[in-house]
Image (tube, rainbow, N blue to C red):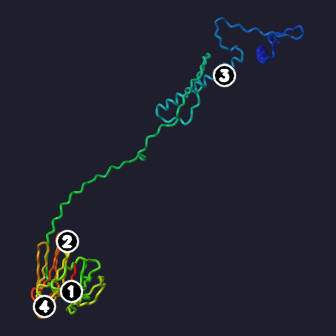
């Protein structure tokens, strides 16, 4: 009972309700008839005993408890900073959540209070991860370049030339036979020349002794795709040159590939000679008829280095008519 009264008196004093000396247990009547209360004496502390604060005023006790709580919070924050710094130094990822502060040690005596250290700003961003092999740029080795072996120079083309003579078909299709070029002489007059639209390889270099036209050749000629006359059917026309030494000259290009030139020509009451020449090679054939007309198809196969030329000369070597024994020419094809 006495302890409760003492606590009540302490609370009343703290709240300002009782003045010193107003303890009901020790109250005495005052001059006004109201009882007066005296503050009980404080218990004596033995000499040399440590001041523990257990008998202090409750307000002082609460203040000291608040200081102890602030020290515990400061110590917990410092521990958290140390943990995060250690994680950053180790290179690992920081924890996703901040661990709860552990309670500080229980002190038997009140430690001296110090302000919490200033917290340094710590970056919580994780270090950049190393690129994975799949995302790293893969550099393919440059393909090895091989130097092509030098090709040996092409062997020089050896000129080749052959000449044969045969009969003429009754009808000759010039456009079908002359795949490279074809030409016909004397369709309209002595100067008429028709040729393939697709070629101009066969050159007419002119006539020695004058050129005339005739229209009674034993064979006929047909073509399509010509110029200036687009087509003709079964024409017996041709050109001639009178007298000994008269004649015609043609020229065609040569190359490494073998080509074939066909010349349709004849004589009337004369003898004629065909001479072909190519890069120093020469071939000849003759035809003769003393009384009438005769025709041949002369076939020349040849080849030579590019840029070479094959030349044909069809010349009257004899005339058996007093005014105009002659050589004649109807057409030529190149394939």
Looking at the rendered structure, the secondary structure element under dot 2 is: loop
Real-space Cα distance between discs 2 and 4? 37 Å
Q: Contact, CB < 8 Å: mark 3 with mark 2?
A: no
3 or 2: tag closer to the N-terminus: 3
The residue where tag 2 is placed is 255
Q: Disc 2 or disc 4, which is closer to the eye?
A: 4
The residue where tag 4 is placed is 325
Q: Contact, CB < 8 Å: mark 3 with mark 4?
A: no
Rendering coords of residue 130 (x, y %): 43, 40
1 or 2: tag closer to the N-terminus: 2
The residue where tag 1 is placed is 330
Residue occupying the far top of the picture: 47
Residue occupying image coordinates x 78% and y 10%? 39
Looking at the rendered structure, the secondary structure element under dot 3 is: helix
100 or 212, nearer to the observer: 212
Task: Reply above or below: 97 against 241.
Answer: above
In the figure, is residue 166 to the left or right of 93? left
Real-space Cα distance between discs 1 and 2? 26 Å
Q: Quadrant of the C terminus?
A: bottom left
Task: Reply above or below: 201 against 2.
Answer: below
Task: Reply above or below: 134 against 94.
Answer: below
Real-space Cα distance between discs 1 and 4? 17 Å
Q: Disc 1 or disc 3, which is closer to the eye?
A: 1
The residue where tag 3 is placed is 66
Real-space Cα distance between discs 1 and 3? 136 Å
Rendering coords of residue 291 (x, y %): 11, 94
Rendering coords of residue 15 (x, y %): 78, 18
In the figure, is residue 161 to the left or right of 65? left
């Amino acid at each position: 009972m006495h302890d409760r009264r003492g606590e009540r008196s302490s609370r009343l004093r703290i709240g300002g309700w009782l003045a010193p000396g107003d303890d009901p247990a020790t109250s005495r009547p005052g001059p006004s008839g109201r009882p007066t209360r005296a503050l009980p004496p404080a218990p004596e502390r033995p000499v040399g005993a440590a001041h523990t604060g257990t008998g202090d005023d409750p307000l002082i006790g609460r203040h000291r408890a608040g200081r102890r709580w602030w020290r515990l919070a400061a110590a917990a924050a410092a521990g958290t900073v140390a943990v995060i710094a250690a994680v950053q130094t180790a290179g690992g990822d920081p924890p996703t959540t901040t661990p709860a502060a552990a309670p500080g040690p229980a002190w038997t005596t009140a430690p001296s209070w110090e302000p919490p250290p200033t917290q340094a700003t710590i970056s919580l961003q994780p270090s950049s991860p190393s690129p994975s092999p799949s995302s790293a740029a893969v550099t393919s080795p440059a393909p090895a370049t091989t130097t092509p072996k030098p090709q040996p120079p092409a062997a020089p083309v050896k000129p080749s030339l052959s000449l044969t003579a045969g009969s003429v078909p009754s009808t000759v299709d010039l456009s079908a036979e002359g795949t490279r070029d074809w030409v016909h002489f004397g369709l309209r007059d002595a100067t008429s020349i028709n040729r393939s639209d697709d070629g101009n390889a066969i050159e007419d270099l002119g006539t020695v002794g004058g050129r005339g036209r005739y229209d009674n050749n034993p064979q006929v000629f047909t073509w399509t795709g010509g110029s200036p006359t687009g087509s003709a059917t079964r024409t017996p026309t041709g050109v001639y040159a009178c007298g000994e030494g008269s004649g015609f000259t043609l020229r065609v290009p040569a190359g490494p590939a073998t080509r074939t030139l066909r010349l349709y020509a004849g004589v009337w009451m004369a003898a004629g000679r065909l001479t072909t020449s190519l890069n120093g090679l020469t071939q000849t054939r003759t035809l003769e008829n003393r009384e009438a007309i005769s025709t041949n198809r002369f076939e020349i196969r040849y080849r030579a280095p590019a840029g070479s030329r094959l030349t044909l000369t069809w010349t009257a070597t004899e005339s058996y008519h007093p005014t105009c024994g002659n050589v004649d020419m109807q057409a030529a094809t190149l394939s």
